[in-house]
Image (spheres, coloured by chain):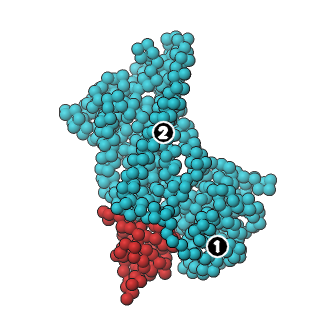
Amino acid sequence: MPMEVPLISLAINQTAIVRHFIGGQHFQHKLRMMGIREGKVIKLLALQPLMGPIVIEIDRRELTIGRRMANHIIVETTR
Amino acid sequence: MKKIVLMGNPNVGKSVVFSRLTGARVISSNYPGSTVDFAKGRMHIRGHEAEIIDAPGTYSLQASNKAEEVAARVLDQADLVINVVDATNLERNLFLTLELIETGKPVVVALNIWDEAVRSGIEIDYPALEEELGVPVIPVVALSGEGIRELVQRMDEVSSSPARPPVSDEEKWIRIGSVTREIQTIRHRHPTLRDRISLASIVPITGVPIAIGVILLAFFTVRIIGETMIQFIFDPIFDLYLPFVTALGNWLGPGILQEVLIGRLIDGEIDYVQSLGILTTGLYVPLGMVLPYIISFYFTLSILEDSGYLPRLATLADSVFHRLGMHGYGIVPLFLGMGCNVPGALATRCLDTRKQRFISATLLAIAVPCMAQLAMIFGVLGPFGLMYILMVIATLFIVYIAGGLVLARFVKGESYEICLEIPPYRMPDPGIIAKKTWMRVRGFLGEAIPYLFAGILLVNILYATGFLDWIGNLFAPVTAGLFGLPKEATTALLMGFLRKDLAVGMLIPLGMAPLQLVIAVTVLTIYFPCVATFAVLVRELGSIDMLKSTAVMVATALIVGTAMRVILLGV
């Protein structure tokens, strides 16, 4: 059953598909520039402790992004 | 003269291409944002001289930080653009390519890191890409120089980009999607050892111990290399030099020339640290004490930079730095500043907002000791034992954290979250490491020696005119009243503005107690950066923010100095 959830709620090593972003033009532009775009497969690699950033893999690249940003990226889980 | 500008995303190897084209040396690293300013060079194309400009990396022409603004400005002057593209990350890189072509300027695409793309199973049909884009596309490996000759040849071909009506971002992404599907095939591969090491270094449970290990190993390496160089190279040279400079002193005889060139004799002999002459202390402090550690520090840091470890460290450190009003990338100016604060101050540009840069620069000036300051700390306190040195380092650490917490709360403005690409690990190239270390060492020499000479000259003149006694009395309420130091220490504190390492020779003869020296050395480190760093900070922050920053520095020095006096001296 596919479900749309914020990226932050994925489990470690879980993959999902990027669906949409919650935020202004500038925010969306920045994410797309970093390679985070609608339709991409995204994998959560690590959560840093103490509300630190998360590390994701997308297109075989690793990216670090802050938690607030990760909260505004909506993904569709594949399972 | 024709102007050729190198444009590309961060960390795609623009600076390496630049070095290949011009033979000039610029600093490149394996992390996004190592070029924060542009570099210029010259090259010959078919007998014509052209100017090449290496712009900072940018994801798009819609600038979102200071380095990207620089890039957009540089582009305006271009007669020809070399768009450096990371072949292992084609899709994301093509956005800027489309934007560049849209400007109508002649564009040549250099498909860099081609070797790594091939190795990792990425196939790009570059003739098809060339056809699709309508501009020359040349695969290159800038590190080895492969393909550079062809790149230069084909720069002649282009006159202007094919006119295309500008399209929206949305349409660009759609086009990029269809182009990459057509011309790129990616073979699936199993995770390699490199992937596993990469993962281990960003997952907290293994990453934090790895980070601590790497940092300890780095400091150990800096110390071993520095000490070894002093023991086998620098000390023997200065031992050989001593008879000459002693003979010169005797030949000059007592007088003003001897005072300035040789300085005071300590127990009838020249003391390299305390004599305070241009040809004695003026040469020994920067060359014999600081330089060896500058060399070993930047050598070690260059290896860390080029391996690609720093963005991983920034990821792990982010939650701490975020609370200090910056984000994890604040670790880059911090590390660079430990060699010399000047490159550290420049590196604050890699942070996104004014608030972040202000905090990073202010804390750098206050609590990050450069090698000259460390040399001073070790030089003054070393004879009394490691404990006193640790007291200074621990105080600086606390000040950095406390200062960050306070500034994060009170400095107005935004502080964005981290958003950082982690590059793959790469084996550092010995040639590039050597070049980079040399460039930074040369930068240090250019700054250190003139200021140290000027400082020594000034101390001698002010001493002779009695000005130093006057100023000592003037500041006595602060030095003696607040910090519990002899009023003569004022001079050393003030001269520290020119060069902090100069203060060593001025503090030692005062015969202070070790705990007093701890206070003196800490205040000296905190209250102000040296004049070279100060000049860079004025440029980076603007004079108004620098004034505010200076107020924070002086206030911190007063508070910390007084607090230490109460805690350490108990009065």
Asked whether the viewer can see residue B74, the reply is no
The quarter of the picture where residue B29 lies is bottom right
CA gap between label 2 and label 1 equals 44 Å
Q: Where is residue B162 in the image (x, y as percent from the top left)?
A: 71, 74
Task: Provide the chain ID for the residue under circle 1.
Answer: B
Q: Which residue is painted at 39% across and 47% down in the image?
A: B216
> Which of B550/B408 is in front?
B408
- The shade of chain B is cyan
Of callouts 2 and 1, which one flags the residue occurring earlier in the amino acid sequence?
Answer: 1
Give the image location of residue B262, x and y in percent. Answer: 50, 19
Residue beneath the point at 42% across and 79% down: A16
**Residue at which label 2 appears:** B225
Q: Quadrant of the N terminus of chain B?
A: bottom right
Which residue is located at x 68 percent, y 49 percent?
B23
Residue at the outermost right position:
B47
Q: Which element is circle 2 on?
A: helix
